[in-house]
Image: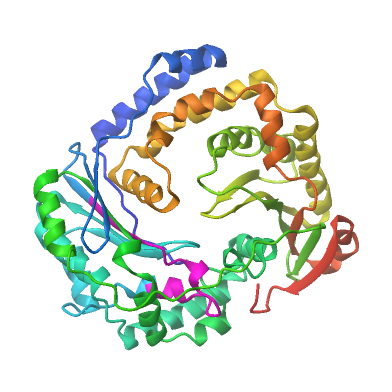
Amino acid sequence: MRQQRHIHIPIPWSKRILAAAVAACAVIVGLSLPVGDILADQRETPSFQLPRYEKFKLQNGLTVYLMEQHQVPLIYVSALFPAGAVKDCDKPGLAYLTAEALLFGTWSYRKAQIEDRLEFLGARYYSYANLETAGVSVSFMSTDLDQVLPLFKEVIQNPTFDPGEFEKRKKRLLLELAQEKERPSAVLDTYFNKFLFGPHGYGNPIYGTRASVQKIGSRDAKAFYEAHYRPEDSALVIVGDFQTGPMKRRVQELFSFWKSAGKLSPSERGLLPAHDRSRILLVNKSDSTETQFAFGGLGIPRNHPDYVAVRVVNTVLGGRFTSLLNDALRVSAGLTYGASSSFNTYRDSGSFVVSSFTSTENTFKAVDLALAVLNRIHAEGVDEETLTSAKAYLIGQFPTSYETPGSLASLLASMFFYGFDETFVSEYRKRVEGVTVEKTRELIARHFPRDRLQFVLIGKALELRDRAGNYGELYEKEIKSDRF
């Protein structure tokens, strides 16, 4: 559903085989060493450094990042706009449809011409909208720069929001929204966000509802674009096989004359909620034989000084396969195929969520066990061996998170939007290693809520209702209802 055309860099089979052999050797060596020795070996290697890049602003206020990467003859271009679902106000789904419609035609190209040209060149492209941002990305062979970049400029500067194409996409989205409610796992996060954040913009369903999408037209998308796709608030990121000097001149030539189409319209996000009691939302799916559940509370924003340290502790609790939650619910009790915890971080706030699924008859065993694990980490903290293992896991994973042009471009875009700098990369190892057993107790007490929790259960209400109210004030909805 709603699949995007993401970037994929093919690797020759010879290199894949070599990489697999190296990885296998690494696993064998890793198994023969204690975790403490592995971490000690990692400390002997230098910290991961972000490759050099240039950042500058055009006269119209557009922020540009240029990062050369010559390992493969590819270029990745991404434009980011502060135009996510938080700006939807009373029209949920508008930000998503606006982002989709950027590729429906421009002043110079029809939708079919855009698709034919990019696909003929073998380019990978997509547009997207999430909770806070929207954007367009494309990757292509570096030899095709002069054909792709002007087309990319047209897409983000001169979209026409063709009414016919817009209505076609809207009809498909309405079908997708109806189908989505048949898969509780696909809507659990949306229900939880809405229940946790309420009227605040962070509670907006990204894809909207059937009722809200039905009322959105191409004119609404055009107005949304004019209000929120503005060069002075946006970023252009280019990573790949190019020379910075000529690329800078090309960017200035193509993007310097882009001007805001209209006045910025203020959008109310609402106030962040302050929950004074535990609540539970029971979403009835009468034909279900299992229950999807999530519980948690408010978390931290992306630029919080404890961001990295919280990731370390969450790795222990539910951030990897060998976490406490997964071990308790899956490995030991056999109640589920998986359980996890996560911190979803935004610009102004965030959420802490524990989630899993189980059979209807085991629902409350699984919820109670997940709560017990959360309470146990509050009571007992994290021991040195477990903490050392979590640190080694995060340090080992970190460099591979930024090994492609696309992932580096995403990092630069996040730095722009969330206001952090390259020290996140250069000091990451230091910050991970700086988390002590004593520090974990402070972090758990401060950032891992266990009181006034908000619960969402999606399952057969007839068999869940009697006990669901034990967790807090009970609210109920039908999954067939259009609203979240």
Q: Is residue 232 above or below residue 368?
A: below
What residue is shown at x 36% (from left), y 49% (from top)?
A: 410
In the rendered image, residue 77, in percent from the top left (x then y), is placed at 25, 54
Find residue 17 and report its horizontal and vertical position in percent: 30, 30
In the rendering, at what x and y percent does residue 63 appear? 28, 55
Would residue 333 be seen by someone viewing this image from the given angle? no
Residue at the spot 36% in from the left edge and 38% down from the top edge: 402
Q: Which is nearer the eye, 265 or 334?
A: 265
Q: Residue at x 71, y 29 (%)?
A: 441
Give the total of numbered labels: 0
Q: Position of residue 418 (x, y in %)?
A: 45, 50
Query: Compared to 60, does 433 lie above or below?
Result: above
Q: Left or right of 206: which side holds 326?
A: right
Residue, x 81% and y 57% (percent of image)? 278
| Residue 84 magenta | yes
Q: Is residue 143 left or right of residue 481?
A: left
Q: Is residue 155 left or right of residue 418?
A: left
Quadrant of image for the C terminus: bottom right
Which segment is the magenta one?
Answer: 76-98
The verdict on residue 180 being magenta is no
Vertical order, 280 against 408 (above or below): below
The chosen color scheme is rainbow
